[in-house]
Image (cartoon, rainbow, N blue to C red):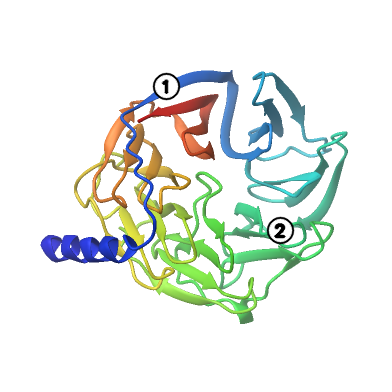
Amino acid sequence: MKYFQYIFILLLVSACSSQKQININFSAVEIESILDQNISIRATLTDENYLWYAGNNGNYGKVDLKTNEITKFKVQSDIIVNEIRSIAQTKDYIFLLPVANPAHVYKISKKDNSQQIVYSERNEKVFYDSMHFKDELNGMAMGDPTENCLSVIITNDGGNSWRKITCDNIPNVIEGEAAFAASNSNLIITKSKVFLVSGGKKSRVFVSDDFGKNWQVYDTPIVQGEAMTGIFSADFYSDKIGFITGGNYEKPNDNSNNKAITFDGGKTWSLVANGEGFGYGSCVQFVPKSNGKGLVSVGANGIQYSNDFGASWKELNDDKDLYTIRFLDRKTAYAAGKNKIIKLSFDE
């Protein structure tokens, strides 16, 4: 089976080779410490000259990417703010969404840090995992089921108001299927598609071609069946090329059935590097301008890199305390995690 999977991947790679290829092969990575403080960070985004981050205890902030100057903020609330694991943006605003009950979407001005709650949901099961904007008007967040389907909220007015999609419009989950707020990467919005990934007793990919009005759901070969197994992170290079990773959180060194790639927009998935490479992955991102060949993952086995669609991996750094990563450009990324933000400069 492994042989045939490898041949299949080679055929898919050949099919993509008709596109103009940019040969990228990272040999090492230089690490620069940006933030060192007692904070857990699982949500970051780049915003022109700034890196915004969000963490536990209502803490968030921004890093000036030219000077590395850090400006720290805190959500103003009369209740305890749970850990913030979802962050999104429009041109003028940052949006924060903490996990657990109650769920509040905070709309925060980039100019003066004024804060407003634009969505509230109270339910003992509520737990939002990821949030992103497609453009200046349309945004979405996803979370664990409070009824029989994944929770999905949508805005079409730039984040001023949000509404929850009913379960009549989303395929039902099975018992024990939910999502993992590991790195704000359970929800991916591409040019014309939306992808949601689930984990736990069942690990699937939900796809919408019309921004949440209709959905299709597809099975994946990622390890699943237990509470802490499944997809923890996904990224899509295009509407067609996507990658999922995760594994068994309770067995972080287990590298079986924990990495898969699609070339048809999530309909079919092929395991890659099965029994090889890294184990539990907290976040995976495509390298920009790599035609989908380049991937970087962070998690329990350090910073890992692939330049062949995930077929093989090499460790660039052994830092096991990173939860999330986002690229600034083709050779620069910022990663965050337990008590830290670091800058990664990749060498070819």
For this view, does 1 lie left or right of residue 30?
Answer: left
Q: Give neighbour class at mark 2: few <14, some 14-19, many 20+ (Cα, 10 Å).
A: some
Q: Indicate the quadrant where residue 296 lies.
A: top left
Amino acid at pointer 2: Asp
Residue drawn at x 62%, y 75% as measured from the top left: 210
Residue 95 in picture, x, y percent from top left: 74, 47
**How many angstroms separate mark 2 from mark 1 (CA)?**
33 Å
**In the drawing, what numbered circle is on residue 135?**
2
For this view, does 213 lie left or right of residue 163?
Answer: left
**In the drawing, what numbered circle is on residue 242?**
none
Residue drawn at x 70%, y 29% as measured from the top left: 62
Query: In this orientation, which residue lies closer to the viewer: 127 or 36?
Result: 36
For this view, does 261 lie left or right of residue 337?
Answer: left
Please identify the residue farthest to the bottom as the structure is shown. Answer: 168
Q: Indicate the quadrant where residue 157 lies.
A: bottom right
Residue 322 in picture, x, y percent from top left: 46, 32
Residue 268 in picture, x, y percent from top left: 34, 71
User: Taking the image as drawn, is residue 83 in sight?
Assistant: no
Q: State the residue position of label 1.
A: 30
Query: In this orientation, which residue lies closer to the viewer: 300 or 178?
Result: 300
Amino acid at pointer 1: Glu
Q: Say whether marks 2 and 1 touch (CB < 8 Å).
A: no
**Position of 234 relative to 18 (above/below):** above
Q: Secondary structure at mark 1?
A: strand
User: Which quadrant of the rendered structure holds the C terminus?
Assistant: top left
User: Which quadrant of the rendered structure holds the N terminus?
Assistant: bottom left
**Position of 335 relative to 103 (above/below):** above
